């Protein structure tokens, strides 16, 4: 049995210790907002936060998550009213939308560390998240538009 | 009170006005076909026609019968219908249509959703509005000419009376649908929705992780399957270790997929499925299968040798499909000639969401949930694979996490259906990224040869172009070994140049891996070769590339490229409605040069490249600026213009152009699938790279205002990107890239 919390709720699972967190979230817990894109930390579609840090959940064994606090896109806000989600809607960022959970989780982590990132900061931080539709210019614009000083942490887990 | 009524008028409506007015509806099938209807959001609605239902609370459901894969169709279809319906946009919901013949073709490909359905969708909106107006006039006992619809209400002009669509819907549903000849439409200046940059209707669901993609389907008692498929096309399973796979925790069963005949067509590939109670266990189980393969003939395929062979062949005289004047004697007699060979490798669509489908097979029926571009094709093929009638197969279309042509194939749904039948439980088939990259339907590898002659005034007097690539039709026949008319209609035989001597020729090339559609298809290689060669000729003549384009395009006119040997397809559109219009090509090019400043001098080590291309009956020009230092290319900015005729949602058109620039840069800079001993060498995003945020330049998009009928949008942006980039690299560095991708020659 492995114990951890997801979006503020305690969870207990009995799975292979090597099973990546992504599949525990998607298949065991039914939280399908975090996406499978590559399985080798190449694309970022599976990005979640572990104790506030962005992590590619497709390569994170569940055994390494014991006792940790996990936040997924569903924990950010299921109604889309987190400031970063709102900026995404405002800039009409999504095309197919598949990578956007991971993009948003990376962007929230970036903005939590750096409230007013430069173009270069954004390039460096976000280059681990692929978007095949090509929404990069809008992602960049959305990140820059998020009001400086917004307390990004306060919404995390509110809907959990 | 329930407003659900038995709507007998629907069929009558279709016969009278229908979708049937256009060529793609099978009016004859309407009598016997039993449709499966999309489920409306509640039971209190009245269906006024195939696309429009009105609820008692005044909410409107509008059907989207095409697949959403990022192009914004679930927003733009309701925009068109709601416009003519005069509905309040805030009250509109979109309902995804199931596979259903009555919609006409649902194959979401060829950049044609709006192009083909614009008129029909307006008709659906206008017809429903006319029924609501008539019902209100009947209620008030006034002349229908004294009422009008606005914002989901019908108003009476001569009094202050108004009635909501929801209130009047039941009465409207009992009326006979109006004669389409009597319908009235809004003028452009009356539009409130068409032409407006409306935000994506699914944005909130997407940004909150609630949108349901093919990968996200979860059914009670469902099993997860992952399939180890043949790495070489046509290879057969000789033996495998079922017990080892089953010893992996979570694995429930293994199953050898039914051996499929060649040609491969849409059949699943041969292989062994591992079925488990979660995806991870299924993926792990595959590693223990230890399959012994009988590889077959395609094991001899190696791209290095194959491309070399095509390059040898391409410099010889080919099979002419379009000839004007005498290219050969002119080339022989000219003092100033130039020639070049270009190649583009196999490419993979690599959408962010790999293929996935979930199936339930029960009581002789099957239900599928899939991220498919082609629900009707899926329905046919699943029915065939299960040996049941098509009307016993229900296809639900989920969101598609990108597609770019890959998800036009029903193979993954067939796999799910076969496994669900075998296991007698719901099964979801999940493709890994390795499966996606290594067992795809690839954009064809290709080689082109171009040659031209110029006179002493730098006028091009001859243009010879040859192309060779394995045809998509090979996948379906196993025998076709040369490019087909529909492929040659994609930017090859429709070359719009005004030169005295012109020859377009093809060469043979057979297939060895599955060939399929990828965004803009053969336009990719044809535009790359032509756009590069125009630039090469300009440099040779000592004039600007912009000027050379004008010279080659010649005077403003409509070009009909059809000849006895070249049955030009024009993207399935009539040439009188969608001609090849030289004036529009020039306007797209001139505007991109003007807006970007591509004709202005640059700093040292920097250069501009331009290209223009007509595809999917739209016109797109691209200007790209690069910097080349120490053999490293940095793309600084990319500008594009698009003339797609009438535009429904300019923001989504803009988004498609942005996406096309990035897709095109991925192809040009990084894209390469290579094959060794019959197997694809790349496996994931680390070795099949696509553009990332830090490689993405500044992007500017200019939409050309036009009242022409709507053209394609999803694909026309891609073709001119690679040539504009290669030309920019040449002007920055003097280095000419003729074999894509750029990464094989320079660091990117």
Image: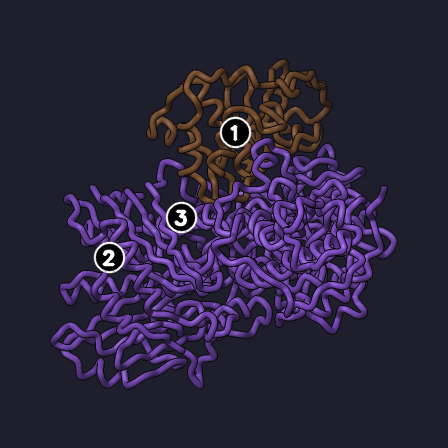
Chain colours: A brown, B purple
Callout 1: 10 Å neighbours few (<14), some, many (20+)? some
Which of the two marks, 2 or 3, is nearer to us in this view? 3
Q: Quadrant of the C terminus of chain B?
A: top left
Percent of width and height locating residue B417? 75, 53
The subunit carrying tag 3 is: B
Which mark, by number, is residue B736?
A: 2
What distance separates the C-alpha of mark 2 from that of mark 3? Answer: 18 Å
| View extreme (right): residue | B363
The subunit carrying tag 2 is: B
Q: Which residue is mark 1?
A: A86
Which of the two marks, 1 or 2, is nearer to us in this view? 1
Left-right relation of B134 to B453: right
Left-right relation of B678 to B368: left
| View extreme (front): residue | B158
Secondary element type, mark 2: loop
Left-right relation of B547 to B379: left
Asked if residue B378 shows in the view, the reply is no
Q: Residue at x 69, y 18 (%)?
A: A2
Q: Which residue is mark 3?
A: B666
What distance separates the C-alpha of mark 3 from that of mark 1? Answer: 29 Å
Q: Residue at x 53, y 48 (%)?
A: B192
Earlier-in-chain disc, 2 versus 3: 3
Work out whether disc 1 and disc 2 sit on a shared chain: no
Q: Quadrant of the N terminus of chain B?
A: top right
Callout 3: 10 Å neighbours few (<14), some, many (20+)? many
| View extreme (left): residue | B456
Work out whether disc 3 and disc 1 sit on a shared chain: no
Q: Is residue B738 above or below residue B627?
A: below
């Amino acid at each position: 049995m492995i114990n951890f919390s997801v979006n503020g709720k305690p969870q207990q699972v009995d799975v292979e210790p090597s099973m990546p967190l992504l599949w525990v979230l998607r298949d065991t817990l039914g939280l399908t907002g975090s996406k499978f894109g590559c399985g080798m930390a190449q694309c970022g579609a599976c990005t979640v936060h572990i104790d506030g840090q962005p992590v590619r959940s497709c390569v994170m064994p569940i055994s390494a998550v014991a006792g940790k606090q996990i936040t997924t896109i569903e924990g950010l806000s299921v109604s889309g009213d987190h400031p970063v989600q709102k900026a995404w809607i405002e800039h009409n960022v999504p095309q197919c939308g598949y990578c956007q959970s991971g993009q948003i989780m990376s962007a929230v982590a970036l903005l939590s560390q750096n409230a007013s990132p430069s173009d270069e900061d954004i390039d460096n931080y976000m280059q681990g998240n692929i978007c095949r539709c090509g929404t990069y210019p809008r992602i960049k614009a959305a990140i820059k538009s998020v009001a400086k000083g917004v307390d990004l942490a306060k919404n995390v887990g509110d809907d959990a | 009170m329930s407003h659900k009524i038995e709507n007998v008028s629907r069929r009558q409506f279709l016969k009278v006005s229908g979708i049937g007015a256009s060529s793609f509806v099978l009016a004859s099938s309407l009598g016997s076909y039993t449709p499966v209807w999309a489920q409306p959001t509640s039971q209190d609605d009245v269906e006024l026609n195939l696309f429009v239902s009105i609820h008692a609370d005044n909410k409107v459901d509008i059907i989207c019968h095409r697949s959403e894969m990022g192009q914004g169709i679930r927003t733009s279809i309701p925009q068109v219908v709601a416009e003519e319906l005069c509905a309040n946009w805030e009250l509109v919901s979109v309902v995804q249509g199931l596979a259903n013949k009555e919609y006409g073709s649902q194959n979401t490909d060829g950049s044609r959703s709006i192009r083909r359905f614009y008129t029909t969708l307006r008709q659906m909106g206008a017809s429903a509005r006319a029924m609501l107006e008539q019902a209100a006039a009947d209620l008030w006992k006034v002349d229908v000419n004294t009422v009008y619809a606005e914002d989901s209400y019908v108003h009476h002009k001569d009094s202050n009376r108004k009635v909501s669509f929801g209130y009047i819907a039941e009465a409207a549903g009992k009326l006979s649908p109006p004669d389409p000849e009597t319908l009235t439409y809004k003028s452009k200046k009356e539009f409130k929705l068409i032409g407006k940059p409306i935000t994506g209707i699914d944005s909130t669901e997407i940004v909150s992780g609630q949108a349901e993609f093919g990968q996200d389907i979860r059914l009670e008692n469902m099993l997860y399957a992952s399939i180890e498929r043949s790495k070489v096309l046509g290879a057969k399973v000789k033996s495998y270790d079922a017990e080892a796979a089953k010893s992996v925790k979570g694995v429930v069963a293994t199953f050898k997929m039914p051996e499929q005949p060649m040609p491969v067509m849409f059949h699943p590939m041969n292989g062994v499925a591992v079925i488990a109670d979660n995806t991870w266990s299924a993926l792990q189980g595959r590693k223990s299968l230890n399959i012994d393969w009988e590889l077959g003939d395609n094991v001899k395929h190696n791209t290095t040798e194959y491309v070399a062979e095509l390059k040898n062949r391409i410099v010889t005289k080919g099979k002419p499909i379009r000839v004007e004047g005498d290219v050969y004697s002119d080339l022989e007699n000219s003092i100033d000639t130039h020639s070049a060979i270009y190649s583009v490798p196999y490419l993979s669509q690599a959408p962010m969401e790999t293929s996935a489908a979930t199936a339930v097979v029960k009581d002789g029926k099957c239900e599928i949930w899939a991220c498919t571009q082609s629900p009707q094709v899926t329905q046919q093929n699943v029915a065939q694979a299960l040996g049941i009638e098509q009307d016993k197969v229900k296809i639900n279309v989920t969101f598609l996490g990108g597609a770019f042509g890959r998800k036009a194939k029903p193979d993954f749904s067939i796999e799910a259906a076969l496994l669900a039948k075998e296991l007698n439980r719901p099964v979801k088939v999940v493709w890994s990224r390795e499966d996606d990259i290594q067992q795809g339907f690839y954009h064809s590898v290709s080689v082109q040869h171009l040659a031209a002659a110029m006179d002493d005034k730098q006028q091009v007097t001859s243009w010879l172009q040859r192309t060779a690539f394995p045809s998509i039709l090979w996948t379906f026949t196993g025998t076709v070994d040369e490019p087909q008319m529909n492929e040659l209609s994609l930017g090859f035989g429709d070359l719009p140049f005004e030169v005295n001597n012109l020859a377009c020729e093809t060469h043979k090339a057979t297939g060895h891996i599955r060939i399929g559609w990828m965004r803009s298809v053969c336009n990719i290689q044809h535009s790359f070769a032509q756009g590069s060669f125009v630039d090469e000729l300009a440099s040779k003549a000592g004039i600007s590339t912009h000027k050379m384009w004008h010279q080659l395009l010649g005077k403003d006119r409509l070009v009909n490229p059809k000849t006895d040997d070249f049955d030009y397809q024009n993207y399935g559109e009539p040439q009188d409605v969608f001609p090849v219009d030289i004036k529009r090509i020039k306007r797209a090019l001139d505007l991109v040069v003007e807006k970007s400043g591509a004709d202005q001098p640059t700093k040292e080590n920097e250069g501009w490249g331009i290209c223009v291309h007509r595809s999917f009956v739209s016109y797109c020009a691209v200007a790209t600026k690069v910097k080349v230092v120490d053999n490293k290319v940095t793309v600084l900015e990319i500008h594009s213009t698009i003339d797609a005729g009438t535009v429904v949602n300019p923001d989504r058109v803009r988004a498609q152009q942005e996406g096309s620039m990035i897709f095109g840069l991925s192809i040009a800079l990084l894209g390469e699938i290579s094959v060794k001993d019959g197997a694809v060498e790349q496996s994931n995003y680390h070795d099949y790279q696509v553009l990332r945020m830090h490689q993405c330049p500044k992007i500017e998009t200019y939409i050309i205002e036009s009242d022409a009928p709507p053209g394609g949008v999803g694909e026309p942006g891609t073709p001119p990107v690679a040539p504009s980039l290669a030309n920019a690299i040449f002007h920055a560095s003097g280095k000419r890239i003729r074999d894509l991708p750029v990464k094989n020659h320079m660091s990117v």
